[in-house]
């Protein structure tokens, strides 16, 4: 392996050392235009607004940058899309928290935000319309409780539960601080609970989570897309179709104007630079930016710049936190790489430098949602721009190429929290998995995805085989089409333990106390485990129904009011259908529903079966009362529950509960139709949010206390795995992964020291091969030992670049909150014989 | 079930990666004729810490990881203690493993009757054979038995054409002196062996003794340093042996 290019080492240092800002440029210019465009078609309103943003926002070229394209007026400042409502909610209620986390905002920006942006969008955002729609359709379950009741709940759930909803409290014992901020936080919680669904389901304000059509930008350039829109306009039948196609033309023009601003900026810098090498670089930047992304790229450097421009502009247009995905970068870029190498116009070393810089840029993104990360600035790379590497091509043959390896090297050299997905098929090079495992000695980024399982799942969901083979990973691990799909793979979710809570409380949820669901009867009178399980599935069916209804209401709001012709113009199908992606213009359309807390609920069901129905050593009434009181005065009962059989240990009867639950959940989800005519697909991913997901869950029959984290993704509960990695993989593989259309993730800590020997690395590779042979979809490893992690907690300054993967995305360990850190440490370490 | 059909198992360890090729399941059997002062499995001395199991029950556990063996070329390792002390159930287990096409490995101290080795000869793909010290008197002092029977068994396995991988626990100050290393090399070359696996001493076993209310025969040693390992490796390599250090 090589070392990081010195110029890229400087870019990395700048990124890690940069202040985090809140910049209002995107929000302000979009708002300004929106104010003027009332009455126009929503596609035109969006196109005009983005045209204004791209004309007026600051253009920055950083020192020694070769790839250009900034997101805002500061090096790190996520683009703000106020029309969504999530940002305005956070700014309206949690600005003080953001500042405490270290975000800075200029006084003038703060004034603009307070006096212009927030007031204009009041009542107009997706969020506002969504909450109104939920209420209209009886889908809300607001927090309608008195302050006294909240205090009682706080006692039951542990003092941190409510606070953790909004921010992460570094130290729960810090009561003074807590008391001081409680009134403000409670107001935020109350306001935020407007979008709390019946049954605790989640349906975010955003959709997105999409693979951009970079392939179309490279093939046609925006000039070609513009031409296609003009051609299609001739056969347009309605004003709406013409309006959409006009908005595509405006968007393409806006992209040309935006890139030309960078050419001008580069030329302006040439005059101010004496270093001849940098002058030549700036000249080259200017040349490239006058060509792409308007024209189809001719060289590797142009192709990479075109991808970055498109990626960057798409993120500005949608706003941060939207899971905008570049896709199969090794495949997209390979023809240019090959041609340039053959023509002698590119060296491998220069390509590596460019790719390293690209990787660093992918890590320059953050989500402004305080509880994603920790107490201080923490979440570089959290707005995942997942890159997909390796796998088969459309023809089914292995498509792993020299660039796959070059990206692997760049990921290792940059050693940032890059989210990279390595596709593995039966046709992958023999040594491929072993090589990716070996990267773990340097960095913790890679995830393994099984082509056979993913492609089978895609075909099952309606993709043509050739399209399925081109799948890319979106967000954490969601397989989606390559620039042909609007799938909103994230954002809507139910929690399995909620269904259990509702069985015990006859349709109510413990925390919110509303009669959300059906009364499935008195649990103490359920004579058999089968009867109990039937009640559980009845409640789960309701949860899935509410969250899909809610998602369709939200999606209708986007379709009617908030289009994105820029992104749509790159997606297969939108121009052909003359419809925005939010209206169903893409070739493929789906929705997503995630399921959370599988391990927690399977362990809980297994405990009920064992202790209540088989051993009869615990009565259902005792159990119900113990859960309601969070085991107060019932430590012995809790201790017994903790000895119950656990998912993840290759135990058939427990694994069978998990298999059935996933199969039934996936069937419930797939049966529901989306607003755009597709169907919903299930996922089992927790985005690293399982700590927060547990905050409002009462105690569970597996012995978990109220407010404690749920199990993450499809992984067993923390500490449950006692029989080593093969046992865990066997348990997971009993589940049919091809039904889980939007993926599942298994996070596994590697044994301490296993990567020190070649045999160890090879054995981890064999684990992956065997798991995939058994039908597993995804696995990723964390290769740090708990001693190292504890040392990092004690001396964070010495471990600033220690990376862990939290359920799909990578994060800097020392920048995570204490609770997530503890959660990661709590993951079982497998022992190997020595 | 009669006692002779079953054996006393004190651990079944899945995902064993340092006990033979590939990914393996290692079955640890209680009972041993030696009392090595650094033994990392003192449970083996005390039958009450083991579970009496029949070979078919053990095999069912072993077969859970069949896919991992197939992918990695791994299989079953029988260890201990000395696994060849009670031969009938071991023979049954190895026969079942071969019937399922698994690679089989037996880790032996060599301190067993030759008839027991002969009984499993056709069922074992690899013997991992420990050499602790070349000096018989010193060996007796360290382990409770001399080297005569052990070395005789090593010759027997060679003469029978068995595949044998010799292993040596590297114990700083005990067996890593120049003389013992040279004599180990003499022994190996005399056997036509081309390689040796060094197993560095570690202290992870110490807590086990306390939990079992036992005292190790030797006070805890300082584990070998990288230099110790390098020195031993170089000396053996100078004699033309391929030396591998186990993780």
Image (tube, coloured by chain):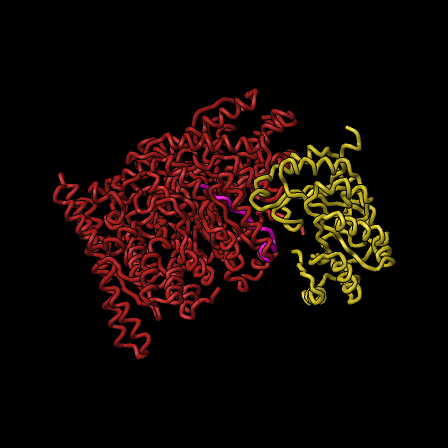
Residue B204 appears anywhere in the view: yes
In depth, the one of A215 and A642 nearer the eye is A215
Give coordinates of residue A349: x percent, y percent: 40, 67
**Residue A751 is one of the magenta-drawn residues:** yes
Tint of chain B: yellow
Indicate whether residue A140 is drawn in magenta: no
- Residue B58: name its quadrant: top right
Direction from residue A257 to residue A610 in the image, left or right:
right
Residue A124, placed above or below residue B188: above
- The location of residue B101, given as percent across then percent down, is 62, 39
Q: Colour of chain A?
A: red
* Residue A714, horizontal then vertical, whole percent: 50, 40
B145 or A274, which lies in front? Answer: B145
| In the rendered image, the vertical position of residue A392 relative to residue A280, given as above or below | above
Q: Looking at the image, can residue A183 be seen? A: no
- Percent from the top left, x then y, of residue A783? 55, 54
Residue at the extreme bottom of the image, as rendered = A274
Give the quarter of the image for residue B27: top right
Which span is picked out in magenta? Answer: A743-756
Q: In which image quadrant can residue B170 be found?
A: bottom right
């Amino acid at each position: 392996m090589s070392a990081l290019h010195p110029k890229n080492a400087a870019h990395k240092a700048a990124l890690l050392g940069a202040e985090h800002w809140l910049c209002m440029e995107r929000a302000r210019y979009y708002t300004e235009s929106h104010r003027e465009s009332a009455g126009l078609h929503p596609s035109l309103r969006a196109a005009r607004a983005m045209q204004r943003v791209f004309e007026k926002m600051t253009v920055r070229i950083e020192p020694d940058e070769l790839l250009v394209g900034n997101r805002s007026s500061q090096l790190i400042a996520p683009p703000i899309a106020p029309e969504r409502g999530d940002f305005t909610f956070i700014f309206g209620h949690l600005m003080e928290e953001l500042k405490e986390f270290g975000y800075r905002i200029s006084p003038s920006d703060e004034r603009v935000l307070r006096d212009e942006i927030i007031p204009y969008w009041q009542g107009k955002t997706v969020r506002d319309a969504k909450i109104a729609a939920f209420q209209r359709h009886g889908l809300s379950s607001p927090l309608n409780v008195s302050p006294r009741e909240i205090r009682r709940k706080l006692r039951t759930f542990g003092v941190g539960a409510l606070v953790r909803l909004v921010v992460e409290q570094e130290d729960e014992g810090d009561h003074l601080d807590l008391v001081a901020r409680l009134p403000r936080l409670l107001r935020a919680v109350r306001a935020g609970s407007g979008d709390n669904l019946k049954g605790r389901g989640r349906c975010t304000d955003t959709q997105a989570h999409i693979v951009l059509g970079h392939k179309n930008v490279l093939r046609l350039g925006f000039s070609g897309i513009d031409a296609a829109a003009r051609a299609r306009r001739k056969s347009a039948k309605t004003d709406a179709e013409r309006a959409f196609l006009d908005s595509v033309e405006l968007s393409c023009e806006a992209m040309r104007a935006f890139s030309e601003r960078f050419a001008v900026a580069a030329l302006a810098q040439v005059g101010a630079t004496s270093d001849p090498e940098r002058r030549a670089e700036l000249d080259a930047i200017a040349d490239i930016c006058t060509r792409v992304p308007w024209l189809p790229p001719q060289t590797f450097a142009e192709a990479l710049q075109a991808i970055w421009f498109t990626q960057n502009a798409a993120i500005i247009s949608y706003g941060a936190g939207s899971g905008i995905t570049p896709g199969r970068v090794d495949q997209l870029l390979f023809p240019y790489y090959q041609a340039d190498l053959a023509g002698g116009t590119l060296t491998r070393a220069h390509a590596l430098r460019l790719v390293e810089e690209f990787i660093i840029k992918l890590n320059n993104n953050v989500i402004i949602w305080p509880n994603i990360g920790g107490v201080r600035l923490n979440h570089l790379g959290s707005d995942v721009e997942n890159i997909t590497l390796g796998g088969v091509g459309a023809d089914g043959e292995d498509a792993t190429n020299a660039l796959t390896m070059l990206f692997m090297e760049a990921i290792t050299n940059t050693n940032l929290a890059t989210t990279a997905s390595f596709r593995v098929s039966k046709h992958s090079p023999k040594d491929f998995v072993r090589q990716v495992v070996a990267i773990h000695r340097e960095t913790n980024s890679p995830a393994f995805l099984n082509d056979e399982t993913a492609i089978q799942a895609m075909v099952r969901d309606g993709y043509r085989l050739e399209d399925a083979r081109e799948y890319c990973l979106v967000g954490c691990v969601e397989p989606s089409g390559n620039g042909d799909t609007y799938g909103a793979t994230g954002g809507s979710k139910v929690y399995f333990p909620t269904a259990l809570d509702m069985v015990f409380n006859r349709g109510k949820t413990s925390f919110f106390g509303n009669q959300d669901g059906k009364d499935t009867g008195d649990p103490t009178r359920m004579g058999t485990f089968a009867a109990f399980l039937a009640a559980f599935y009845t409640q789960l069916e309701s949860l899935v129904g509410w969250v899909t209804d809610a998602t369709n209401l939200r999606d209708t709001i986007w379709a009617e009011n908030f289009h994105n012709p820029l992104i749509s113009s790159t997606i297969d199908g939108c121009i052909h259908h003359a419809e925005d992606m939010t209206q169903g213009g893409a070739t493929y359309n789906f929705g997503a529903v995630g399921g959370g807390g599988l391990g927690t609920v399977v362990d809980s069901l297994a405990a009920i079966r064992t202790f209540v129905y088989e051993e009869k050593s615990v009565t259902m009434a005792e159990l119900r009362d113990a859960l309601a009181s969070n085991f107060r005065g019932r430590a012995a009962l809790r201790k017994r529950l903790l000895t119950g059989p656990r998912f993840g240990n290759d135990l058939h009867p427990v694994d069978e509960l998990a298999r059935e639950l996933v199969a039934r959940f996936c069937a419930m989800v797939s049966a529901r139709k989306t607003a755009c005519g597709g169907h919903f697909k299930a996922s089992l991913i927790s985005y690293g949010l399982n700590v927060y997901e547990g905050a409002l869950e009462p105690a569970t029959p597996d012995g978990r206390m109220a407010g404690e984290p749920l199990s993450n993704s499809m992984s067993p509960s923390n500490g449950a795995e006692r029989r080593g990695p093969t046992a865990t993989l066997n348990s997971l593989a009993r589940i049919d992964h091809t039904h889980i259309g939007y993926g599942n993730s298994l996070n596994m800590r590697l044994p301490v020291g296993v990567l020190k020997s070649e045999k160890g690395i090879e054995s981890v590779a064999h684990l992956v091969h065997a798991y995939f042979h058994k039908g597993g979809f995804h696995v990723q490893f964390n290769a740090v030992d708990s001693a190292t992690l504890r040392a990092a907690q004690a001396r964070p300054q010495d471990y600033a670049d220690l990376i862990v993967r939290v359920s799909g995305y990578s994060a800097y360990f020392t920048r995570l909150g204490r609770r997530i850190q503890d959660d990661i440490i709590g993951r079982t370490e497998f022992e190997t014989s020595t | 079930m009669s006692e002779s059909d079953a054996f006393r198992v004190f651990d079944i360890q899945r995902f064993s990666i340092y006990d033979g090729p590939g990914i393996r399941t290692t079955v640890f059997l209680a009972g041993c004729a030696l009392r090595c002062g650094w033994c990392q499995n003192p449970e083996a001395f005390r039958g009450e810490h083991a579970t009496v199991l029949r070979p078919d029950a053990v095999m069912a556990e072993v077969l859970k990881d069949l896919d991992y063996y197939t992918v990695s070329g791994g299989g079953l390792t029988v260890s201990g203690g000395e696994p060849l002390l009670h031969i009938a159930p071991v023979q049954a287990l190895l026969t079942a493993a071969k019937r399922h096409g698994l690679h089989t490995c037996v880790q032996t101290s060599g301190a067993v009757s030759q008839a027991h080795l002969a009984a499993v000869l056709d069922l074992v793909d690899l013997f991992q054979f420990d050499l602790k010290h070349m000096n018989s008197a010193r060996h007796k002092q360290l382990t409770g038995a001399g080297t005569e029977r052990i070395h005789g068994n090593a010759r027997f396995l060679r003469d029978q054409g068995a595949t044998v991988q010799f292993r040596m626990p590297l114990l700083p100050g005990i067996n890593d002196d120049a003389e013992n290393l040279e004599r180990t090399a003499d022994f190996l070359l005399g056997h036509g062996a081309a390689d040796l696996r060094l197993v560095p001493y570690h202290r992870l076993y110490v807590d086990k003794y306390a939990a079992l209310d036992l005292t190790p025969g030797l006070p805890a040693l300082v584990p070998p340093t990288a230099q110790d390992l390098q020195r031993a490796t170089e000396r053996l390599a100078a004699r033309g042996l391929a030396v591998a250090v186990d993780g």
